[in-house]
Image: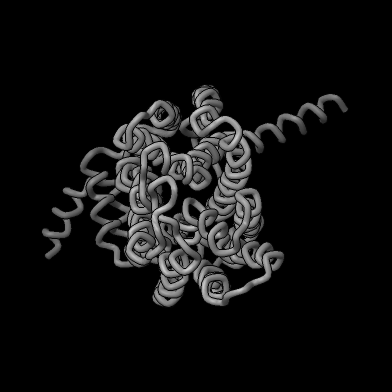
Amino acid sequence: MMAKNRAMTFSFLKSAYPWLIVCCGMLFYCYNYFLRVSPSVMQNELSQAFHMKAVQFGTLAAFYYYAYTPMQVPAGMIYDKFGVRFVLCLASLMAVAGLAVFISADSYFVAGCGRFMIGLGCAFAYIGTLKLASIWLPPNRFATVAGLTTAIGMTSGALAQTYLTHVVEAIGYQHALRGALVAGVILSLIVLFLVRNRPKSENAIAEMQAPLDIKQLFSALRIIFTNPQMWLIGLIGCLLYLPSSVFLDLWGIPYLEAVYQLTPEQAVTISSYTFYGWIISGPIIGAFSDKIKRRKMPLTATGFFAALLLCVVFYIPGLNVSGLYMIFFIIGFCCGAHPLCFALGKESNPIQISGTSVAVTNMLIMAGGAIFQPVVGELLDLHTSSPVGVNGLPVYTASDYTFALSVIPLGVALGIFLSLFVKETYCESQAKESDEQIFINKPLSDLEAEAEAAK
């Protein structure tokens, strides 16, 4: 009996160990999300500290994306070349260093540099988690992990806004963020001691072969960037992610305060309901997609309802405040299908370059934050006609916010229309056999020579 119990315990630990490693990546993504959304509850404090208008505030927050977005492709290539363990640890330390610079900043430029460094480190968070999932877990768990990772990140975002709202008012944003420095160092150590690059099994799949050489890495980029489906998937993902990258990450709380005259605590609570809907639906829709072996249908159907409800929020005046909780929860639930874009990106390319293909997908998706966070600020400054407030900064009205944030429902609607043209992958790689061979048996030069001789 004891031997049987030991065998069962060993079997459980063996099956749980891959998930433990993937969870280390998820923890870093949580930390990334905390740092990403933190400016959303600090608008007044940061605007006064650096004397910023809306466009400057949006640009300061977007410094995160200015590093995060272009680093997606190099990050994926670095993972494919060097593995996950040490890269993920160093990325975490970079984010901690950026947070230290941001906290101690005494000028707009230095604060922007801090946000840039945070984005540089956090650029490795989501890709690293999905890279670990593609190595350690079966292929039919990829969309589930993508949805679960997003859900856990959303939980971190909701808790971050709730925590920071109270603490920033009490002790200021600099003291409120100091605890995150210690948490970041601890997280780096957890990654270093627990994460491993690949299983020791001799029967490793092609994903776990020797790292790609430089020629293969550039071949990977050629395959990805000449694939029209990748550009379409990236654009759709960018547009469907605007409710998060623009509204939840930055402008949602100021909008709710201005339009519905809510206190900061009420605005954070309503915003959190969007996170909660996203949290619940992400893993459910991901698992459902894996089960039915379809990506396109769940993405299009849920996106349609998200666009419809966003139009209700922005264009129907006088909504009951109590009803906003349910509306924003359903919006979040509908947006939970968004991680399927990563599955589509991964499955549209050879499995051997999954890290790079997911990175390119994430780069195109996150470009929305870099572009539209400052754009909303610029639209606010252009539309406002209110007198300057007591602190010398403009006061933005409900109509200003509605005008500026109209980019969100319009963008989501366009994303749904474009999703009609995406090819279904049926949860399997759609790469051509010639593309697969580049990374499995022969270098690209040999394949090209054989093709030339065959002519």
Q: How did the renderer colour the structure?
A: one colour
Q: In this view, does 446 lie to the left or right of 238?
A: left
Q: Which residue is drawn at 28% across and 58% down?
A: 434
Residue 190 occupies quadrant? top right
Front one among 370 and 357: 370
User: Can you give x and y, in whole percent of width and height, for residue 54 in the image?
Assistant: 38, 53
Front one among 328 and 395: 395
User: Can you give x and y, in whole percent of width and height, for residue 398 in the image?
Assistant: 50, 66
Instruction: Report the quarter where the N terminus lies.
Output: top right
Residue 407 occupies quadrant? bottom left
> Is residue 285 in sight in this rendering?
yes
Q: In this view, does 124 lie to the left or right of 434?
A: right
> Is residue 353 in sight in this rendering?
no
Front one among 18 and 377: 377
Q: Which residue is drawn at 11% across and 65% down?
A: 455
Q: Residue at x 30, y 52 (%)?
A: 437
User: Can you give x and y, in whole percent of width and height, for residue 441 in the image?
Assistant: 30, 46
